[in-house]
Amino acid sequence: MTGRFAFEIDSGDGDARSGRIFTARGVVRTPAFMPVGTAATVKAMFPQDVRDAGADIVLGNVYHLMLRPGAERIASLGGLHEFMRWPGPILTDSGGFQVMSLSKLRKLDERGVAFQSHIDGSKHLLTPERSMEIQALLGSDIQMQLDECVPLPCTDAEAERAMRLSLRWAERSRKSFAEAPGRAIFGIVQGGAVKPLRIESAKALSSMDFHGLAIGGLAVGEPQDVMIDMIRTVMPHLPEHKPHYLMGVGTPDDIVEAVMRGVDMFDCVMPTRAGRHGLAYTRFGKVNLMNARHADDRAPLDPQSSCAAARDYSRAYLHHLFKAREILGMMLLTQVNIAYYQELMAGLREAIAMRRLADFVAEIKEGWARGLEASV
């Protein structure tokens, strides 16, 4: 690998910006949506199909990969990129969120999190230092600090405790990060839905020389207006010249609202999970292919789509595949959804560059509204 990690802003429109993140393994065009490859695979998709859909970067999950097949094993097999046949950049999360949400038993203290695997009950200790070691073994291009993510709503006291612990873990994560050409580490702003805590977290992390800053602890059950309020609160306190990443978000509407407020990066399991359950995302909004109304519909999901799965297969056929529980249905709708998300990001980038973001957002929201009316 050669090169350096860098972020360049090419265009702006209001608070929104389009740009490029440079890594040793390639360039990420922003705003960017990262398909989630939890266990070294974007579920139901070939790596080349993910690339062909327009994705520049994918996300890998520390918790799942450390448990199976193991970070040391992946390293011995050439690293995560070689293992999953993805040559482009990979961002890995720290594993903290999954420890909190999936482990059978867990005990959190200043050292880190001791937990039992949800797979076989084996015992593990995930510390900031171990999380950074695992991510280095995987060979990820962007690594995330270990943090504690609390569900919302929560008490102000609980949000403060988790935020301060996450700041202490951020310092340890940054210190343990193995510097390498083109490799980066991001800090994570926490603080629940408490504005002063979010501001304090953002300011403290901005002083720690991270390569980028993420907003964590949102899209965990709070209403959209709370999420937007927290983004609006945090943004003035993040370095403008570094990437801004909103973790775990989300719906197309959430993404659009966040881009308009200066967010550059997103990830979410929503498009792949929905695709495996018969729900398609299109420029006409969401389409539930499990609905009987599609059983005799010869029309495709979108005759103008660049995605063959959306353009060349009838709604009746897709409906049949899900009713028959055929794997092809999951594969086709996952392709539809990943392609739509990438087309949305490309449209946002172009609109920002042309300084017509407000018009573009109005047009796509009108399309979603028309689709909703047609489905009633």
Image (tube, rainbow, N blue to C red):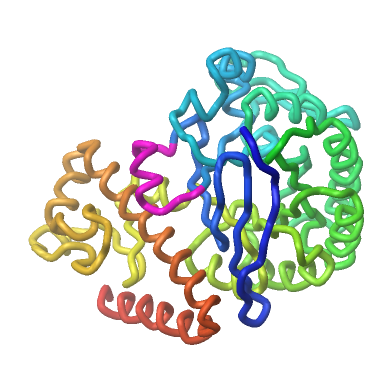
Q: Residue 265, percent across and down?
A: 60, 57
Query: 20 left or right of 239?
Result: left
Quarter of the view holding residue 308: bottom left
Quarter of the view holding residue 61: top right
Q: Is residue 48 magenta?
A: yes
Q: Which quadrant of the rendered structure holds the C terminus?
A: bottom left
Q: Is residue 216 magenta?
A: no
278, 180: nearer the viewer:
180
Q: Is residue 12 above or below residue 215?
A: below
Q: Residue furthest front?
A: 2
Q: Which quadrant of the rendered structure holds the N terminus?
A: top right
Range covered by the magenta-colored residues: 42-56
31, 277: nearer the viewer:
31
Image point (52%, 30%), residue name: 81
Query: 300 left or right of 96?
Result: left
Q: Residue 112, percent across and down?
A: 83, 29
Image point (86%, 53%), residue name: 205
Q: Magenta span: helix, strand or loop, mainly?
A: loop
75, 253: nearer the viewer:
75
Image point (43%, 59%), residue name: 341
Q: Residue 131, percent across and down?
A: 74, 29
Quarter of the view holding residue 29: bottom right
How many numbered tags mark residues here? 0
Q: Residue 52, percent across and down?
A: 35, 48
Q: Is residue 18 above or below residue 122?
A: below
Image point (84%, 46%), residue name: 162
